[in-house]
């Protein structure tokens, strides 16, 4: 098994926890495409992997704000799984706790070959008919396309996700936590 890892970091570096994990595990890694949106970057990186790494069996995709835990090492150990992912909390109420997330995943070259043979763009945002409302993220589109070809993504643990938040004090020692994308009226209560 030979794995190439791509870190998605537009104009930034991997966080110190991810950098330490990459170093400690002697991971063969480089930056993914810096194009944006993330769906375009992921697709371009898949194409680059297929073109430049013909002798590699798998690729790992990691967003630069992922914080690995011990389960991340499972990405390097199980040669039999075609698609593996670690769950993580996203922005606001979004995230990939129960659904495939490309921010921390491993995909076999075989899956990517099958998707390219089917002329399928693996990662794509899904919008309504008028294209003015996002219905689904690129990760869920990938999972549907892969599942249609008989590949079932396997969750292998969880990772942290660095997200900016705003903390507000409240009576009784409690605080309100507001992810930076939410309006003040959507505060989340925390202890």
Image (cartoon, rainbow, N blue to C red):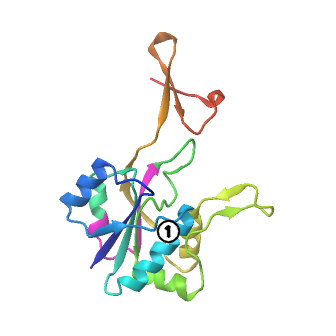
Residue at image point 47% right, 85% down: 113
Which of 60/140 is in front?
A: 60
Against 119, residue 159 (above or below) is: above
Residue at image point 56% right, 41% down: 92
- Can you give x and y, in whole percent of width and height, for residue 185 in the image? 66, 27
- Can you give x and y, in whole percent of width and height, for residue 18 in the image? 30, 53
Residue receiving disc 1: 42
Work out which quarter of the rendered image holds the C terminus and state it. top left
Work out which quarter of the rendered image holds the N terminus and state it. bottom left
Q: Quadrant of residue 82?
A: bottom left
Q: Is residue 38 left or right of residue 25?
A: right
Write down the region rendered in magenta: 75-88
In the image, residue 85 lies in the stretch drawn in magenta: yes
- Can you give x and y, in whole percent of width and height, for residue 56 in the image? 32, 82
Residue at image point 53% right, 84% down: 116
Which of 118/163 is in front?
A: 163
Q: Quadrant of residue 45?
A: bottom left
In the image, residue 15 lies in the stretch drawn in magenta: no
Mark 1 Cα-neighbour bin, 10 Å: few <14, some 14–19, many ≥20 = many
Q: Is residue 71 left or right of residue 66?
A: left
Q: Is residue 113 left or right of residue 66?
A: right
Against 190, residue 165 (above or below) is: below
Residue at image point 76% right, 61% down: 131
- Can you give x and y, in whole percent of width and height, for residue 108 in the image? 40, 77
Against 180, residue 108 (above or below) is: below
Q: Quadrant of residue 51?
A: bottom left
Numbered marks: total? 1
Residue 149 visible in the snapshot:
yes
């Amino acid at each position: 098994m030979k794995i190439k890892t791509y870190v998605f970091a537009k104009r930034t570096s991997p966080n110190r926890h991810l950098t330490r994990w990459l170093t400690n595990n002697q991971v063969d890694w480089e930056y993914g495409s810096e194009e944006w949106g993330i769906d375009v970057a992921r697709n371009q990186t898949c194409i680059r992997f297929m073109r430049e790494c013909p002798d590699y069996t798998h690729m790992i995709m990691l967003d630069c704000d992922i914080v690995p835990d011990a389960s991340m090492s499972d990405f390097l150990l199980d040669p039999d799984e075609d698609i593996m992912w670690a769950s993580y909390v996203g922005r606001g109420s979004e995230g990939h706790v129960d659904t495939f997330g490309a921010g921390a995943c491993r995909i076999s070259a075989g899956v990517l070959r099958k998707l390219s043979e089917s002329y399928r763009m693996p990662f794509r945002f899904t919008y309504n008919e008028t294209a003015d409302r996002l219905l689904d993220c690129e990760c869920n589109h990938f999972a549907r396309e892969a599942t249609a070809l008989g590949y079932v993504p396997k969750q292998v643990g969880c990772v942290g996700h660095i997200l900016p938040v705003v903390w507000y004090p409240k009576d009784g020692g409690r605080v309100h936590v507001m992810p930076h994308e939410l309006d003040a009226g959507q505060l989340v209560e925390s202890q």
